[in-house]
Image: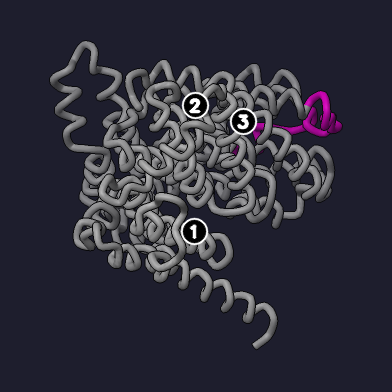
């Protein structure tokens, strides 16, 4: 066995010992046996997630929870694999996949860059180009969206004869990477990280964070970070923008097919799905009956209805708008689904009152946070999540940080707002922009050869830190106002 395989086997063995034998380890002062078992199960699973992968270790985590005496395995499965978060992700992935297979995304980009203001100067062009990606990312999977925009950016580079590694080409690639990640953190719509964060909060407290509350806090922060990104590009990066002055935008729009039946219906159905997510909280004040009725179906019903409608309706050739088997096989990120199920089950175990982990943690850390500014705690946790998500899965980073932070905030007795923390940590988990290991779209961008890795690393981490500062200083007070009364 070579060194690499030996190290892998050693990590797996260590994790299995922690996961299955944690109950027999010496316990921390006063920690209940089952709390120690769940805590070490979490540590062992985290090691596997970070070093091995998030696929089979998630299934292992689900199985290991069955050995904790206070937990019922059937209820574990019902609250994880059978939870509305998991079914929500499956049907949302399918609807997003169907939308991505239409020309809609390119049409959005073309609409933005053909505005009169976008034609005024190269900087205005870049602003509108990045803005189009950020706005599209509000409702689209970031990786799917990024792949669509790769074709557009490469067409621009070819028209301008930009060489790989040039400062202008690198800036465009860095900008669209950041805009894509930034937009995906500003809403929970079709995004696994924010949905997981909201699910973890619900599992820990029994309370729900509405989409409008989340967006009311995260969208202003995201817009400020977007403006800050442009300022950094203009005054620190300072690329030669003169080639963009010769860009013939008409060539980018040439060959765009007219809007067809399939694209119109798919977009209409997807917008209806989004409306059913957002409208209940927007109409609560003047249409409380309708708002409560829509909310009573949960977050899974809208994408489920969307999937059914897309499978029933047909395109110009008489084919179903959604090929169910194809969307299920290629549109759903099953690794994300199984990990979300494991995370929800693990979070439920950590917050289970019979196990007593959160009670123990709350009593242990309450003296430590007494007198500490909530903004300091929030900034530290947001920054930790933002830095971690650039070296590992955003689902892992969000899970770890909320597993640490939520018990502290809930134990504060109202001094700190756990709902606001959950929203902003979920936002920070989307900002994986600095390294190829952050998420697939970053690796795809680097793989095209147009972006310099040192530039991505430098400006990526700079914007990550500045984003964490803005999230703590502006986002947390906003979130606390929108989520007043929540623990």
Q: Residue at x 59, y 54 (%)?
A: 392
Q: Which mark is residue 218?
A: 2
**Picture quarter with the C terminus:** top left
Q: Which mark is residue 434?
A: none
Note whether residue 480 is visible.
Answer: yes
Give yes or no for contact between labels 1 and 3 (Cβ–Cβ under 8 Å). no
Instruction: Rate crowding at label 3 as few (under 14), some (14 to 19) or many (20 or more) other CA atoms within 10 Å.
Output: many
Of residues 158 and 130, which is closer to you in this image? 130
Q: Residue 132 location, x and y as percent?
A: 56, 31
Q: Residue 307 location, x and y as percent?
A: 26, 48
Q: Which residues are magenta?
A: 234-254
Badge 2 or badge 3: first in the primary sequence: 2
Badge 1 or badge 3: first in the primary sequence: 1
Give yes or no for residue 235 being in the magenta stretch.
Answer: yes
Q: Relative to 359, does residue 321 appear above or below in the rendering?
A: below
Q: Residue at x 73, y 35 (%)?
A: 462
Q: Residue 254 location, x and y as percent?
A: 60, 39
Q: Relative to 11, does residue 460 appear above or below in the rendering?
A: above
Badge 1 or badge 2: first in the primary sequence: 1
Q: Which mark is residue 43?
A: 1
Residues under labels 2 and 3: Cα distance? 12 Å
Farthest residue, direction top: 286
Total labels drawn: 3
Of residues 320 and 19, which is closer to you in this image? 19
Residues under labels 1 and 3: Cα distance? 26 Å
Q: Which mark is residue 468?
A: 3
Q: Secondary structure at mark 3?
A: helix
Q: Nearer the viewer, mark 2 or mark 3?
A: 3
Residues under labels 1 and 2: Cα distance? 30 Å
Instruction: Rate crowding at label 1 as few (under 14), some (14 to 19) or many (20 or more) other CA atoms within 10 Å.
Output: some
Instruction: Rate crowding at label 2 as few (under 14), some (14 to 19) or many (20 or more) other CA atoms within 10 Å.
Output: many
> Does residue 144 appear to the left or right of 38 in the view shown?
right
């Amino acid at each position: 066995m070579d060194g690499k395989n030996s190290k892998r086997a050693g990590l797996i063995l260590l994790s299995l010992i922690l996961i299955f034998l944690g109950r027999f380890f010496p316990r921390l002062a006063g920690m209940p046996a089952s709390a120690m078992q769940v805590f070490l199960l979490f540590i062992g699973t985290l090691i596997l997630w970070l070093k091995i992968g998030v696929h089979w270790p998630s299934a292992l985590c689900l199985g290991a929870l069955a050995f904790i005496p206070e937990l019922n395995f059937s209820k574990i499965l019902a609250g994880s694999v059978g939870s509305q978060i998991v079914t929500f992700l499956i049907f949302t992935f399918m609807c997003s996949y169907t939308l991505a297979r239409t020309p809609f995304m390119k049409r959005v980009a073309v609409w933005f860059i053909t505005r009169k203001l976008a034609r005024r100067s190269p900087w205005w062009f870049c602003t509108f180009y990045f803005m189009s990606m950020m706005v599209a990312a509000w409702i689209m999977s970031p990786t799917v969206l990024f792949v669509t925009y790769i074709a557009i950016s490469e067409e621009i580079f070819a028209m301008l004869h930009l060489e790989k590694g040039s400062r202008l080409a690198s800036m465009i690639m860095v900008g669209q990477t950041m805009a894509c990640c930034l937009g995906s953190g500003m809403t929970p719509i079709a995004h696994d990280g924010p949905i997981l964060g909201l699910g973890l909060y619900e599992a820990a407290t029994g309370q729900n964070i509405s989409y409008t509350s989340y967006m009311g806090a995260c969208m202003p922060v995201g817009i400020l970070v977007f403006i800050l990104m442009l300022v950094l590009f203009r005054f620190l990066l300072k690329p030669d923008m003169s080639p963009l002055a010769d860009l013939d935008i008409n060539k980018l729009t040439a060959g765009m097919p007219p809007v067809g039946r399939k694209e119109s219906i798919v977009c209409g159905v997807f917008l209806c799905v989004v409306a059913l997510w957002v409208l209940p909280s927007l109409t609560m004040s003047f249409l409380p009956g309708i708002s409560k009725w829509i909310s009573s179906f949960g977050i899974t019903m809208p994408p489920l209805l969307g999937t059914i409608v897309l499978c029933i309706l047909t395109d110009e050739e008489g084919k179903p708008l959604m090929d169910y088997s194809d969307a299920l096989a290629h549109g759903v990120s099953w690794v994300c689904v199984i990990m979300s199920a494991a995370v929800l089950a693990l979070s439920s175990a950590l917050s289970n009152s019979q196990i007593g982990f959160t009670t123990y943690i709350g009593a242990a850390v309450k003296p430590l946070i007494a007198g500490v500014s909530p903004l300091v705690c929030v900034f530290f946790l947001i920054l930790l999540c933002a830095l971690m998500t650039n070296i590992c899965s955003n689902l892992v980073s969000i899970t770890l940080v909320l597993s640490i932070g939520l018990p502290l905030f809930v134990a504060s007795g109202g001094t700190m707002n756990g709902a606001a923390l959950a929203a902003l940590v979920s936002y920070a988990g989307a900002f994986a922009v600095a390294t190829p290991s952050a998420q697939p779209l970053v690796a795809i961008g680097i793989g095209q050869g147009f972006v310099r890795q040192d530039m991505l690393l430098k400006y990526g981490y700079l914007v990550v830190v500045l984003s964490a500062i803005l999230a703590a200083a502006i986002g947390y007070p906003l979130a606390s106002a929108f989520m007043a009364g929540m623990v």
